[in-house]
Each structure stands twice: as structure tokens, then as C-alpha cells.
Amino acid sequence: MEAGDLDAVVGPLDSLAYLIAGMGSNDVKISGRIAEGLQVVVATAPDEPHLGSIFGKLVVNLDPGAVDLILSRQKLAPFKRAIDYRLLFAIAAVGVVVLALFLYWVRKLRTLNRALNRANSKLHEVSITDGMTGLYNRSYFLERGEAEFELSRNRSLRFTVAMIDVDHFKPVNDRMGHVFGDACLRHLADILNAHFQRTGDLVARYGGEEFVAYTLSGEKDQVRAFLERLRENVAESPALVDGETFSLTVSIGFHSDVPGRADTLEQFIDKADSHLYDAKRNGRNRVNGDL
């Protein structure tokens, strides 16, 4: 022993295990095995001469029963681990609550994400749609048109732009009112939307009573016939507004070609618009364009 610390001890293994457990230390080295008949000698310090005789008398007076009692007290008592079921149930309850909260928030987040996606989808739809007719708006037409125009150029496909204008529409608004005129435009939008349903078709409201469409479908000799059928459908399908029928006609100008390296969508629109004004100057309710 130095400074109150245990340096070494000799004894049976069960007693040593008891001491090691009580020390709570892992820094222990067990060396060798001592024979059962080994005689142990106790030494005392020179400045305490009476301590040796005391130890001697103590050992001599011990009978075998007392020795066995001392040894039995040094033996390691069996260790039993007690399970705290209340603590176990409390931990389990906390775990269930945490799991329930986690599942609740996961479900909540999924619901919020779905609502956010629907809102974003609706916002995008509003941003690309003309609120009055339900057709695409001008900005979306130009955005999609640029991409499709480039596709036509790369694949050498025919690209057709058609400008469509309602004939004599200003007098309709002046005489019947804007509510009646808006109803007529929605009726025309339904006809246009039903007509441009092929792959590569898109129709939009360009502004006022003017509409624009492009198509990648059809051969050269089919383009004019396709637009003529549209003009005939409009003339043969009068609008029904508040129980009153009103006939509409449209003038159509178009430009159709395979885009060259220097061509642009804006040039195609300008040419179609020029042909539209020629159609209106030449009597309206007609199709005019170049292939």
C-alpha cells in the first residue's frame, strides 16, 4: 500500500474478484497461482515492534471455524440484475410517442407538399393561359414556338404559322357590348382548340380578337386545305349567346416553309401577319399565304 492505494494483494480468486469489483478499476494484473498449502508471513515496520506480536497472537487464537467464517465473508456474493419494468415501459411509451409524432409530421409534410405542388401547377397554368378564352397566351406561344421552330430547323420539318383575325369584330363590341363580344371570342376559341389537335399543333390568343397558331403537321399541299377547313367551320358554326345566335367569320394569313439557317420565328409571324392583312383587304373570310 502506498498513499492509501492498493498495490498488490494475495488471496483466492473469488475474493480478488470481489475486491476488483469494489475498486471499479480495469487496471489490474493477475499473475500466477498460489498453492493452497502456502504459509503466509506478515511483516511489520521496525518502529512498531508490538504490531508483530499482536498479529501472531491473533493468528494463533483463530480456530478453523473462525478462519472459514472470514474466508466466506470475502467471497464474492452472487450478482443478480434486477429489471426495472417501470423504466422499461416509460422508455417504450416515449418511443411510441416519438414515433407517432414522426409519422404525423411525415404525413403532414406529404399533404403540404401535395398542396404546394397543386398550387405551383395552378400558378404555372395561370401564367401560360389566357384568362378569358382558356387558350394559351402570347408569351407561352412564343416560348414554345421558339423550341419547336428550332426542332423543325434541325430535323428539316415544315413549320407553319397562321394568324387568325375575327372579321368586323369592333362593330360587334360597339353594338352588342363587350360581354357579348367576349362570349363570341370564347366560342371561337373552342372551335380553334378543337381544330388544332394534331401532334405539333398549338393555338393561342395573340391579342384582342386576333389568334395565332403553329403546326408541324401536314405536307405542303395539305397546309392550305387544313386552314380552309378551319375557316369553313367558323362560318358554319354561329355563336349562341343568351339565346341569340351570331355568325362569325375569320380571315387567315399563313406562312409555311422548312426553316433555313437564317430564319427566325419572328420572321414567320411577320410574313403570316402580312398575308392576313392581304386577306382582309381582299374581302375577308378567306385564307391567304405562301408555301
Image (cartoon, helix red, strand yellow):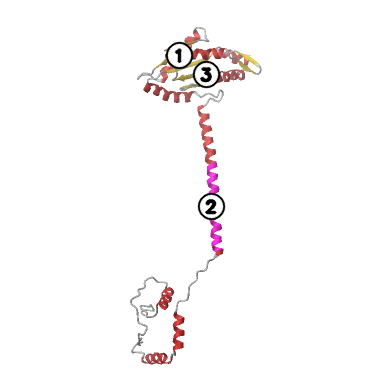
Q: Say what secondary structure mark 1 lies in.
A: helix
Q: Say what secondary structure mark 3 lies in.
A: helix
Is 267 within the magenta?
Answer: no
Quarter of the figure that contains the N terminus: bottom left
Q: Which residue is mark 1?
A: 222
What residue appears at the point 53 percent right and 42 percent down from the top-left corner? 110
What residue appears at the point 45 percent right and 84 percent down from the top-left corner? 70
Circle 1 crowding by C-alpha within 10 Å: few under 14, some 14–19, many from 20: few
Q: Position of residue 19 (x, y in %)?
A: 42, 76
Q: Position of residue 124 (x, y in %)?
A: 50, 31
Query: Which of the two residues, 218 or 23, is positioned nearer the viewer here?
Result: 218
Q: Which residue is mark 2?
A: 99
Is 88 within the magenta?
Answer: yes
Amino acid type at mark 3: His
Circle 3 crowding by C-alpha within 10 Å: few under 14, some 14–19, many from 20: some
- When asked about the image quadrant of residue 267, the answer is top left
